[in-house]
Amino acid sequence: MLYRCLPLIIALTIGISTSAQEIDNTTSYKNINSDKYIRLSIDNDYFSGRDQQYTEGANMELCLPGLKYFPLTKLLVSPKYSYSRYGIGIEQAGYTPRKINNPEIQTTDRPYAATLYLKTFRMAVDTINKQTFTTVLSTGIIGTDALGSEIQEQVHRVLKNQKPVGWKYQVHDDVILNYQVNYEKQLISFRKYFSFTADGSARVGTFSDKAGVGVTALVGYFDNPFGAVRPSKKFHRYMYDRPAVDIIGYDATLEGGMFNHDNPYTIPASQLNRVIFVNRVGWVLAVRRITLEYFQTYTSRQFTTGPRNKWGGIQFAMNL
């Protein structure tokens, strides 16, 4: 069934964005049918046989009704929909050039960079018009204190991979303060077997500025992500595909932080590709309180001399 999409059009016309902050748990294919859960997300290019660009990311997320009273939640605007979910998460990510065994600056590739930040989010769900409106506030740091070098070296030690030797040239310390708005609307659905949605997002701040549009198709057997929260004991399994386009404004992992310009090496703004294509395909299993997911993501070139990139990941969630 088709719905009026004026809110979506509005969402698509505001803001500018980039591909930093790769882990986004607010879209329909990430739905957990509960307002109380924990979720662990792990991204790594190891799943795609690579070791470059966005090389690893991890997010630990907690969703609870009581987080409505968390101080930073007060900064999140939201329409008066049927109900809201409230959550916080800690996210860490690392970025490297292609040749991590090269001890010199690689002037045609991306710089080393690491990020660590707190995400505070509020997701409003409209069960009547089948739409969601989410706001996310990210606060943290980019630079040496984000532990990119330590984490990648430890992972490579465990996996017996080559040691990365260029982290001394990483993007230097700066502040992360970002605000993001996401809107998604279900356009077509068939019971619990098929769903097709369109979404738009806008992000602005000291870390990442971008706007994005995308569509998502879910096929299988699943709870309606735009429905009321009703815990289920049934076995759900489905796959999804989400192609999207991002319009790039600013990316601190490539260009350096907004305030600290004392970096060994960064990518000039003139070399950024301003339009990025992203496609994500995933498989999800959910039974009772547990949800498991595996996915693969592909992106086009982020800058003129950079490669196309892909990575995979897993997620584990448990209702509380």
Image: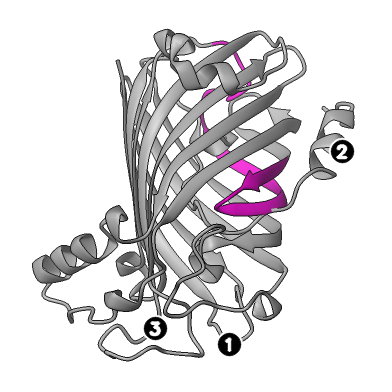
The x and y percentages for residue 181 are 67, 35
Give the class, few, some or many, for how many residues have Cα within 10 Å of label 3's Cα (few <14, many ≥20).
some
Residue nearest the observer in this picture, 306 or 44 = 306
Residue stretch rendered in magenta on the structure: 200-228
Q: In percent of the image, x 57 and y 42: which residue is there?
A: 178
Magenta stretch: includes residue 205: yes
The x and y percentages for residue 296 are 45, 60
The x and y percentages for residue 208 are 59, 53
> Distance from label 3 to label 2 (Cα)?
38 Å
Residue 9 numbered tag: 2
Q: In percent of the image, x 39 and y 76: which residue is there?
A: 52
Q: Characterize the magenta stretch by its predominant secondary structure.
A: strand
Q: Can you say whether 265 is above or below 120 in the image?
A: below
Q: Quadrant of residue 159?
A: bottom left
Q: Can you say whether 165 is above or below 282 in the image?
A: below
The residue beneath circle 1 is 305
Left or right of 31 in this view: 183:
right
Type of amino acid at the residue the image marks with label 3: Arg
The residue beneath circle 3 is 98
> Distance from label 1 to label 3 (Cα)?
11 Å
Q: Quadrant of residue 150?
A: bottom left
Does residue 303 show up? yes
Question: SS at mark 2?
Answer: helix
User: Who comes first in sequence, dot 1 or dot 2?
Assistant: 2
Question: SS at mark 1?
Answer: loop
Residue nearest the observer in this picture, 151 or 310 = 151
Type of amino acid at the residue the image marks with label 1: Thr
